[in-house]
Image (cartoon, grey):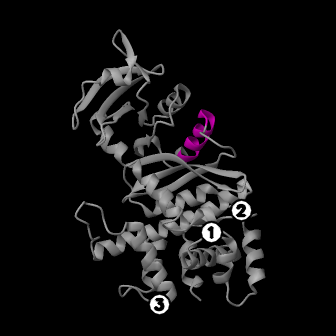
Amino acid sequence: MQHKPVQHALQAHFKLDPRRLEFIARFILALLKVRTVNLAQIATALNGRALLESNTKRARRFLEFKLDQELIASFVLALVPDEKLVLCMDRTNWKFGKLTINLLVVGIAYHGIALPIAWMNLGKNGNSNASQRRALLERVLKLVPASRIFGFAADREFIGQAWFKSLLEHGVNPVIRIKKDTLIQHRLKIAPAWAWFKALKPGEVLELGKARVMGVRVFVIATLTEDGELLALVTVKRPSKALVIYAQRWEIETLFGALKSRGFNLEDTRVTNLERSERLFALLVVALTWAVMVGEFVSSLEPLRVRNHGWVVKSVFRQGLDCLRQILLSGESRKLVLDDVVLLLSGS
């Protein structure tokens, strides 16, 4: 009856019908055991007392239930420290036959991985538009005040006058990379970014100061990457911190790796309905966040081993995922049992 303590822990976060909460607990445990979102595989670990076909049908029916994103975001926020946050935005996509599933995600940068708090299935190929980003931002701001957001990091895909203005109007500090041919107006001169920073040498950082980019007044800061590529950022607050904030953008890439081949094999899903895919993603977020919290705890007992080049042998997420799976499949891991890791899920 592994689901009982998990169900009890989730009650602190989700005020739902006990039967729905029981299913969520069972689904999360099955997902951790089989490490795939494929419903046919999850059904094999969902409820041993039920027929496999019944488990599959139940899983499909559950995805008809509207699981509010705000509930999931509140769950994530309840487990992270009450301090300033760096948010990251990016999208991930994959194909199922001729269909492209394209998710736009905003997450909290946390111990090397982003924890999702808002997402949207774009329902099309390619980039998002300013109105879609604005809608996602407004969802985030219902739960996280702008004053708590230290920086909002995004790559070159997420630029544009309307989008920049939305961030500034909401009091959110953007830390966004611009393309090398983006025009910058500084004082009385207008030139592309590469021209302003062509004298940069590797390791140097140059702050251009207040300038206009796409009609918006911002600071522009630039350096060169290890391979000599220009990294130019726009921001409106704390320009000296911009590079540090932007470096955490990579944590959303780590998230996508954890959701896919390094964790839950999101690309195995056969769910093509946009709303159902968002609900499936919500359940993934619960499992992933739990794994990260367990990994953080395990690494506090036994620090992560670091290779010679500076990379850790296992991420916090993978530490937690492996620990949870070992407990669920064999009963114990590193002298931890289910009750120990359930405490981390409840926020205790």
**Residue drawn at (41%, 35%) of the image:** 177
Q: Position of residue 53 (x, y in %)?
A: 77, 81
Mark closer to the chain start, 1 or 2: 1
Q: What is the crowding at mark 2: few (fewer than 14 residues within 10 Å), some, or many (at least 20)?
A: some
Give the vertical position of 56 relative to 307 (above or below): below
The residue carrying mark 3 is: 331
| Secondary element at tag 2 | loop
Q: What is the crowding at mark 3: few (fewer than 14 residues within 10 Å), some, or many (at least 20)?
A: few
| Secondary element at tag 3 | loop
In the rendered image, residue 276 lying in the magenta stretch gets the answer no
Magenta range: 129-140
Measured in 3D between alpha carbons, the distance from the residue under mark 1 to the one under mark 2, in whole angstroms, is 9 Å
Q: Position of residue 265 (x, y in %)?
A: 57, 66
Quarter of the figure that contains the N terminus? bottom right
Main structural element of the magenta stretch: helix, strand or loop?
helix
The residue carrying mark 2 is: 271
